[in-house]
Amino acid sequence: MPHLGSVKSVILGLVVLWGLAAVVLSFRPGGLRAQFRLMARRFRLALILTGAFLLASPVLALTLSGSNLRNGASTVLAALLAVLFLFLAQDPPVNS
């Protein structure tokens, strides 16, 4: 089965990527456990903002159905939610 060589390479690359991520995260302040907690917090925030986009996007499409602003409004909404994510997903200050 010569075509499985590329599949094995992809799987090996994913394993190396996970290992490298674990090593890098364990060097950060608070250790690996704190980094996974922050990752879960960011994931929940991303799910909430995605839900907000999925709820607001059809509302914008219906209210601006005859306008040329329809596509632009969705783009602006996505950009605003992305900026909101960048501000809310920052690491909390480390108590020293």
Image: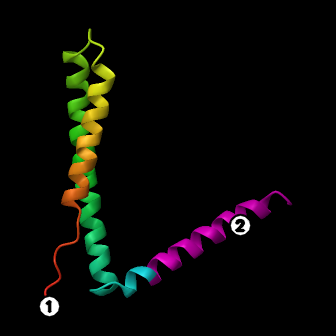
Residue 68, quarter of picture: top left
Residue at the bottom extreme?
96
- Residue 71 left/right relative to 3: left
Residue 54 falls within the magenta-colored stretch: no
User: Residue 8, percent across and down?
Assistant: 72, 66
- Residue 30 left/right relative to 19: left
Q: CA distance from mark 2 to mark 1?
A: 43 Å
Front position among marks 2 and 1? 1
The residue that disc 2 covers is 9
For the stretch drawn in magenta, the main secondary structure is: helix
- Residue 8 left/right relative to 70: right
Residue at the right extreme?
2
User: Residue 44, percent across and down?
Assistant: 24, 58
Residue 6 falls within the magenta-colored stretch: yes
Q: Quadrant of the N terminus?
A: bottom right
Within 10 Å of disc 2 (Cα), the crowding (few <14, some 14-19, many 20+) is few
Q: Callout 1, which amino acid?
A: Ser
Which residue: 23% across, 62% down? 89
Pick whichever of labels 2 and 1 is earlier in the sequence: 2
Which residue: 25% across, 49% down? 83
User: Residue 60, percent across and down?
Assistant: 22, 23
Q: Nearer the viewer, residue 11 or 61?
A: 61
Q: Which mark is residue 96?
A: 1
Q: Is disc 2 placed on a helix, strand or loop?
A: helix
In this picture the colour scheme is rainbow
Q: Which residues are magenta?
A: 1-23
In the image, residue 3 sits, relative to residue 34, either above or below, namely: above
- Residue 84 left/right relative to 68: left
